[in-house]
Amino acid sequence: MMRRASSSFTPKYSPAMLRRSSSNSSPKQQLVPPSWEWEDESGVQIQDLDGRKIYDLFYWEKAIQEDGDGGKVVFCRRKDSEAPVFDLVMKIKSKDKLAREKYEERFRTVLKRMLNLPPHPNVMPLEEVLEDARYFYVVMKRASSDLTSGLLSGYKDGKVPAATVRTVMKQILEAVDHVHSQGILHRDIKLDNLVLQALSVETKRVVLIDFDHADPDFSELDADKPQNHLFGTRSFNAPETWLGYFSKQSDLYSVGVVFYMLLTGKSPHCHKLFEDFEDRSPRARQHICQETYRRLQNSEIDWLCDPFLEQTTAKHLCRRLLAFVPSARPESAGAALAHRWFLDGDGAEGPGEECLLAS
């Protein structure tokens, strides 16, 4: 299971290090204020349980995930629902733990943003959020399956056709483009946070979930300001995030890791690059973050493995997404969607190939 990182450190690298010249670099994008508008007290709000207990409102099955301090994830259903199906997921987040991480108010803002996010077919909406003195209770629809097992179950030989990979990547990038357009960075895009939602017996669509680590009010004007936390999951994190820098391009790097894994069945980097720093001192964690950045800088991705020798256009897009320097990646998810692989493909639909995803 991939390890998630959310640890304090203080970067010692300057933004200039992340903007070294590169033959693949695109012109520097002009920084402009965000086009979205957000009024904190408008729209759907978090509901206070006001003395009620959460189990007065919901039935739930045993926990499918626990993270200490009473935090857990459960399949559930409302008690006032006539359907006997556990069709919802509830994430219970400890306020004490969030407070220790100095993230409670930021997390509250994330929840409010997600409650009021304009709908998109590839982004999982929140059904409702409730709270009491100790916990947030985040309720959303239950997915049909996770992305990996859901894809593989549709193909008897265990190989996902190129046409399906293209549809998956298109839907992922459309989801990312939507949240970015609303001034939100996800900061934890990975296979575990991509699920399949059934539209019918035969067709499904990809849905992006889990905005726990999101930046709810990102602006390009703040892109050069380092964070004092490392958010995300280590093996999916962009190199510059180890120094505290998050941007649209760091989200796109994570999309590139997913793309590489879908194409090759392996991670672009050896897991040994990512040293575990749980229970380490802040100084030790800072050293590990800086060392991981250097390791990624010197790491070579295998671009000669199957299927890259045949799928050269897919390789070109993947290399752009996984570029070490952020400015060498696409300027946006929309720019990535304009890549010729989505228009022409290579190794695309062949005889007998059938895409099981809704386009």
Image (cartoon, rainbow, N blue to C red):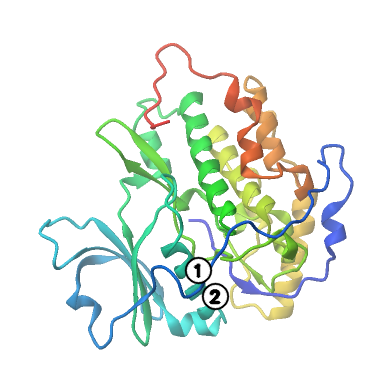
* Image side of residue 348 versus residue 138, left or right: right
Q: Residue 106 bears which disc, if any? A: 2
Return the residue at label 1: 110
Q: Is residue 224 above or below residue 119?
A: below
Q: Secondary structure at mark 1?
A: helix
Front residue (pair 301, 127): 127
Q: Quadrant of residue 197?
A: top left
Q: Residue at point 57% right, 34% down?
A: 264
Q: Residue at point 52% right, 35% down?
A: 170
Q: Is residue 202 above or below residue 180?
A: above
Q: Which residue type carries mark 1?
A: Val
Q: Quadrant of residue 18?
A: bottom right
**Residue found farthest to the right:** 21
Q: Position of residue 25 (x, y in %)?
A: 82, 41
Front residue (pair 25, 162): 25
Q: Is residue 54 above or below residue 23?
A: below
- Mark 2 near mark 1, Cβ–Cβ under 8 Å? yes
Q: CA distance from mark 2 to mark 1?
A: 6 Å
Q: Does residue 345 appear in the picture of this structure?
A: no
Q: Which residue type carries mark 2?
A: Arg
Q: Secondary structure at mark 2?
A: helix
* Image side of residue 274 versus residue 14, left or right: left
Front residue (pair 193, 105): 105
Q: Position of residue 296 (x, y in %)?
A: 74, 52
